[in-house]
Image: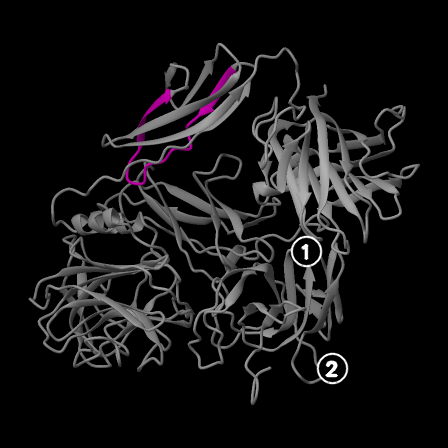
Amino acid sequence: HFGAGGNLEGTFRADPTTGALLWVADCHGDTYSAFPQGDVVYSVGHAHYCGNLPGGFPQTTPWTYHHISAFTLEAQSTSTPDIYGYQDHAGQPAPGWLHIWPQFVVGSFTGQGQAGWSVSGNADYVVMGGEFPSVNGTAQQGLVRFARSANAPDTQGPRLSGSAWAPRVTSTASGTVQVQWQPNWDRDNETLTYRVYRGSQAVAPVHQRTVTERTWVKASMGFTDTGLAPGSTQQYRITATDPFGNVAQTAWVPVTVASSGTPSAYVAAVRADEPVSLWRLDETSGTTVADLVGTDPGAAGTGVTRGAAGAVGDGDTASTFSGTSAGLVHSTVPANAPDAVSVEAWVRTTTTRGGKVVGYGSAPTGTSNGADRHLYLDNTGRVFFGMHSSGLTTINSTGTYRDGQWHHLVGTYGSGVMNLYVDGQRVAQRTGVTYERSYWGFWRIGGDRLASWPSRPSSDWLAGSIDDVAVYWKVLSADRVLAHYVASGRGGPVPNTAPTAAFTATSAALTASVNGAGSTDPDGTVVGYAWTFGDGGTGTGSTASHTYAADGTYTVRLTVTDDDGATGTVAHDVTVAATTSTDLARDAFERSLDSGWGQADVGGPWALTGSAAGYAVVGGQGLQRIAAAGSTRAAYLGVASTSTAVSTSVGVDKPQTGSGTYISVVGRRVGTAEYAARLKVLATGVVNLAVTRSGTALQSTDLPGTYVPGTRLEVRLEVTGTDPTTLRAKVWPAGGTEPAAWQVSASDATAGLQAAGGVGVVSYLSGASTNAPMTVSVDDLVAVPLP
C-alpha cells in the first residue's frame, strides 16, 4: 500500500505461525498478487523501482513499469535506504532479485493503466491474469502462462539486432581496427556469449566472450583487431547467443583500415580496460563532445573553452571550464548509476574555490537533486572521492593539487571498498561502505551539487582544465591505474600485466590431453606454456598429452609466460583409468560421501546444480536429496557423444503427493538443453515414462503396475544420430524381465541439440507435493557410445 497509513508497496514473506518477518522486497509500485513456486516467489503489479533491493532495477525517467517480478524464496541480502523519499525498510532481510523480463501492453478495461492483476500456477507453469492485450509482441488477451525452464520452448533469444544494435567500428592507426559494442539483453537469460566476426561467419570469430550482467547495466565491450593490411576494406559483425542457442546479430559494418597513424599509448591503455565512455574533450569547437568508445556523446555548455594543451603527451587537446554553471559537459543518454564504478579524469587548476571535476547526477544540467560517485577538490586543492551510501561518504588526499600542473585522478568503488588514486598512486582507501545508491542520471564534468558533502568548497563548479574523462562499470585495479598514468608519458615504462592461465582437459584410458589455448594476456601475447602432470612428467606447448603409469587423480598445472616474462598459473585435477571398455561413463557409487557425488568410476567428476549438501553417496547409491517442493537436483558428466546408450536404476524413498516426483535420465546435454527419458512417479503409484526435449514430452505412456517406494526401476535410454536425433526408452522393475520392445520413441531435429553432449540424472519434486524432503537414489549408471 502506498499513501496515507501505508508503508509497503512490495512483496514480503512472514512466518504464518509467529508473524515474524522473513524478508521484504522493498520495491515501489503497487503489488496485487504473489505466488510461490518452489524456490521462487512471483509477484504481479506495476513495480517501477526496486533499487532498495540489492541487484534490483533502477527507477528510470520516465518510469518503466515491470508487471511481473521474481524473487528468491530465501533471504539473500539486506534492504538499503531509499533515495527518493519513499517509506523504506533499510536493514531488513531482502530476497534476491531474479531475472524475468517479459513485455506487456497495458489494458484499458479498468482505466487503471494496468497489465496484470493476479498470478498463480502449479509445479510447471506460472499463470498471470489481467487486462493486457499482448505479451512479448504477441496478441494474448488477459491470460498468459510462463513455463518453468524444463518445459519452456526456449526459442526467444537476445532482443536487439540489426540497426537496433549497432557496433562502433573505427580505424585510426595503421593496420588496426577498434570494435566497440554495447551489451544485448534477453528476456529470460542474463548470460550471453558475444562473438566478433571479420569478413564472414563461415570462419571462426576473431574474438569471443561470455558475459553475465543485468539488463540495465551499461557495460561496454571492445576488441582491437591488429595485423591487418593498411588500406584494405574489412567488415565486422557481432553476434549474441543465449544458453539455448538463440542468436541475434548486428548488420555487417564496413571499415577501411588506416594506412597511417600511430595509436595513442594512453588511449590504448584505457581501451584495454573497456570503459563505458571516454570523453577526450579534444574538439576544437562546437557543443558536442565525442565519446571515443561508447555511444553517449556529451554536450558542452557555453562556459567550456576548447583547445587547451592536453594532459597525456599524444598531441590531443583538453577543454577549460569557467567555474560557473555554464562550465559543464554532461552525458546525453540517461542510465542507472553503476554499482561498481571507476571514475577517471585529468585536471589542471590553480583555483582557491575548489569544485567538482566529474561525477554522477540525477539531472543533466543545473543542480541535481542527487549526486555522488564524484571527484572534487576542496578550497585547498585536496582531492575527494565521494559515494552516497548510508551517509555522504568520502575519502581524500592529504596532499594538495591546485598547482597549475596536470594531475591524474581515479576514484573506484566496489564490494564495499572505496579507493582514491592521484598520479598513479593510491592516496586513500575506505572499507565497509555498506550501501551504494541506485538512481537514474547522467555523468557531469565540471560541476554539480556538493551541498552537505565533507569539506564542501566555495564553488561547486571547477575553474580549470579537464582532459580524458573515462568511466567504467567496474573497479580498476591499482596496477591498471598506474598503467594509465605511465601511458601518459610519465613515470617510466607501462607496468606489465601478468597473463591468465586457463586450460581444459580430457582423458582416455591412462592418457590425459590438455589444451591451454584459452590462456590470455591483456597487454601482450602468451609466448610460453609449461605443463606439470602431477607424476613428475612435464610438457610444453599450448596443447599436450601425457600417459600415466597407473589409475588415479593427478593435479595438472599449467604455467604460461607472456612476452614480458610475467607468468600465470592454474591447476586442475585430472582422473585417468586403465580400461579396455568403451564406456563413456560408468559409476557404481561404491564410495562414501556425506555431500556431493565426487568422481565417477569413468567419466570424470560429477557437476552438480545447487549445494553439494543436496547430494550424497551412501550404501552403494548416489542420492539426490530434494529439500522443498518445487526444487530440482541435477548431476551431469561432461562426456561427449552423438549416439549414446544410457542405463541405470533409480528409486524414491517414500509415497508421492501432489504431482509426484520426476526423474530424468539424460542421454545428451548440449549447453543447457537436453534429451532425456523422464519418469513421473505419481501419487497414485502410476509411473509415466516419456522421452523429452528439455522437459517437453515428445512421446509418453503410463507403465503397467504400481510403484512401491524404496524399490528399484531399471531405465534404458538410447539417443542416436543427428538431424534428426532418435530417442527411445524402456523401464522395468529391478529383477524383472526387460521388455523386448521400446516403450516410447520419437525423433527430433532441434538445432541446438544436434551435437555431441553429456549425460546425467535430474530429479524434481512437484510444487504441489506436501511430503518434502524426498530422496531419489541412483545406481549402476553406464553410458556407452553406439555405432
- For the question of whether residue 749 can be seen, the reply is no
**Image quarter for residue 330?**
bottom left
Q: Residue furthest right?
A: 704
SS class, disc 1? loop
Q: Is 402 drawn above or below residue 98 in the view shown?
A: below
Tell me the amino acid under the disc marked 1: Gly
Name the residue located 77 percent from the left edge and 56 percent from the top edge: 768
What's the mark number on residue 109?
Answer: 2
Name the residue located 60 percent from the left edge and 39 percent from the top edge: 671
Colouring scheme applied when the structure was drawn: one colour
Neighbourhood count class around disc 1 (C-alpha, 10 Å): few under 14, some 14–19, many 20 upward: many
Q: Is 653 drawn above or below residue 296 in the view shown?
A: above
- For the question of whether residue 389 can be seen, the reply is yes
Q: Is tag 2's residue or tag 1's residue first in the polypeptide sequence?
A: 1
- Image quadrant holding the N terminus, namely bottom right
Is 41 part of what is drawn in magenta?
A: no
Q: Is 352 drawn above or below residue 292 in the view shown?
A: below
Report the side of 74 relative to 305 (left or right): right
Query: Disc 2 or disc 1, which is closer to the eye?
Result: 1
Tell me the amino acid under the disc marked 2: Phe
Q: Which residues are magenta?
A: 511-531
Q: Is 43 drawn above or below residue 168 in the view shown?
A: below
Instruction: Say which of 538 and 608 sits in front.
Output: 608
Judging by the rendered image, the residue that carries numbered circle 1 is 38
Instruction: Say which of 697 and 171 sits in front.
Output: 697
Report the side of 652 relative to 269 (left or right): right
- Mark 2 and mark 1: span between their CA atoms? 33 Å
The x, y position of residue 144, in whole percent, is 74, 65
